[in-house]
Image (cartoon, helix red, strand yellow):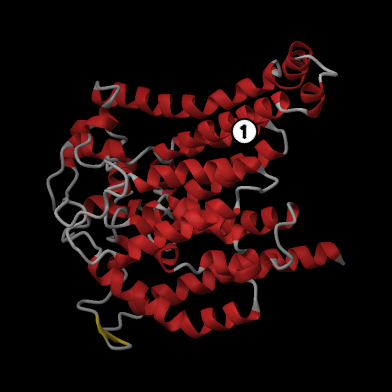
Amino acid sequence: MARNKTVSGLLAVIGIVLISTFVYWSPFLFRATFWFGLTIPKSDFLYIYSHYDGPLYAVAAKTLYIPSLIEKFILPISYDVKYFSAHLPLYPLLVRLFAPIFNYSKSTIVVNVSVTMALAVFFYYLVKQFKLTKSPLVLTFVFLMLPRFLIVRSVGAPESLFILLILLSLFFFEKGKYLLAGIFGGLAAMTKTPGVLLFGAYLLVFAEKYFRYLRHPEIISGSVSKNQMLKRVQHDMWFNWQYLYLLLIPIGLILVFFLYQIQYKDFFAYFHSGDNIHLVSPFAAFNYDAQWVGTAWLEDIFFYFFFYLMAVVWLKDMKYRSFFYFSLIFYVATVFVQHRDISRYSLPLWPFAVIAFERFFTTKKFLLTLIILLPAIYLYAWNFSLENVMPISDWTSFFSK
């Protein structure tokens, strides 16, 4: 009975992903030129294919960062060949894997939607396995319907893959399976550079354990000396050779840099990719004059900072310490980003915020509010998708196999 319930729950999760994605795609699939008040010039599915940064990942997938092939790729904008090093290779490699069946642009979508289904299934399993909520299906629905995430998981983008790998690494770390935690963490670092922050989070977990040993009641009472307790630490923690598997996380990023050394003859090509590295100073997004900001209407960014900081604070006493420390480190890194699109940069914090506030997100009042606002979520998504597109007129390079 319980097994049937789990299977039906997983099927429901997949159904939510597919149905919600289809609704988002609808005006472009049906080539609607007028859609709930929105005018869609030359409406077709090319709006989805050309959504930033999908085409850029398609370039990386087809060329494998080889400068001569990048220069031959038909693009509407002239990019320096090293610009594509900011688009790390794991997602492009998956796109390349499916390109012979579809093509490079279609594969960016197929891979992302497939990975999103896997992410939704695993998130459902995670919150159920760790008993983080009494309503795993409802919480998964809420997780999937964040407006910015709805868009990102339905176009060509690596965020779903990145979040899935982060959650897998944290899950296996908490289960004490450090090889798997290291493998998935390394893959996360090969998807987006902030994946390496997992390694920092795990170091903080170990540091917390060490300082807890030093504050142990037996030391304070004098019944056990610090040297004796240090031996316990060495036995229980520091000399567990399996922790070395976590070095696979930074190694994953180093392997990416070795690939760049082979293709670009520049080990540090990522740092020479132009204006793709947006880490500047705390709250640097509040600068209308910055290239990737360009507006003073930024109050939504403040609310993202506020909301995610509240989530970090709520997770402070969580049983699963790696969840808290990763959220903390990632939040601090996000605060330094100078970019208008903080909603996208901060997406890896979203599953932890959902977990932190699960009691609120699973209430009937919140669900009623969410359902009422579903039309607004989709109107936001459709409106955004009319603007955030690369102006591609020649699709020859993208649609070849």
Q: Taking the image as drawn, is residue 273 in sight?
A: yes
In the rendered image, the quadrant that contains the N terminus is bottom right
310 or 156: nearer the viewer: 310
For the residue pair 30 and 18, the one nearer the viewer reads as: 18
Q: Quadrant of residue 237?
A: top right
Residue at the top extreme of this rendering: 227
Q: Is residue 152 visible?
A: no
Which residue does the image show at 64% across and 33% down from the upper left?
180
Q: Residues within 10 Å of mark 1 (few under 14, many from 20)?
A: some
> Relative to 181, is 356 above or below?
below
Q: Is residue 81 left or right of residue 305?
A: left
Vertical order, 54 against 5 (above or below)? above
Q: Which three-letter amino acid code belongs to the residue tagged 1?
A: Val
Q: Residue at x 61, y 65 (%)?
A: 140
Q: Nearer the viewer, residue 163 or 337?
A: 337
Q: How many marks?
A: 1
Nearer to me, 59 or 204: 204
Q: Is residue 42 above or below residue 65?
A: below
* Residue in the picture at 16% in, 40% down: 72
User: Which residue is disc 1 drawn over?
Assistant: 205
Q: Measured from the top left, where is residue 81 in percent x and y?
A: 19, 36
In the shown orientation, is residue 136 left or right of residue 370? right
Residue 148 position by quadrant: bottom left
The residue sitting at 24% across, 79% down in the picture is 40
Q: Position of residue 346 (x, y in %)?
A: 41, 53
The secondary structure type at the circle numbered 1 is helix
Q: In this rendering, would 360 be left or right of 22? A: right
Tell me residue 300's x, y (percent).
Answer: 34, 66
**Horizontal side, residue 378 vs residue 14: left or right:** left
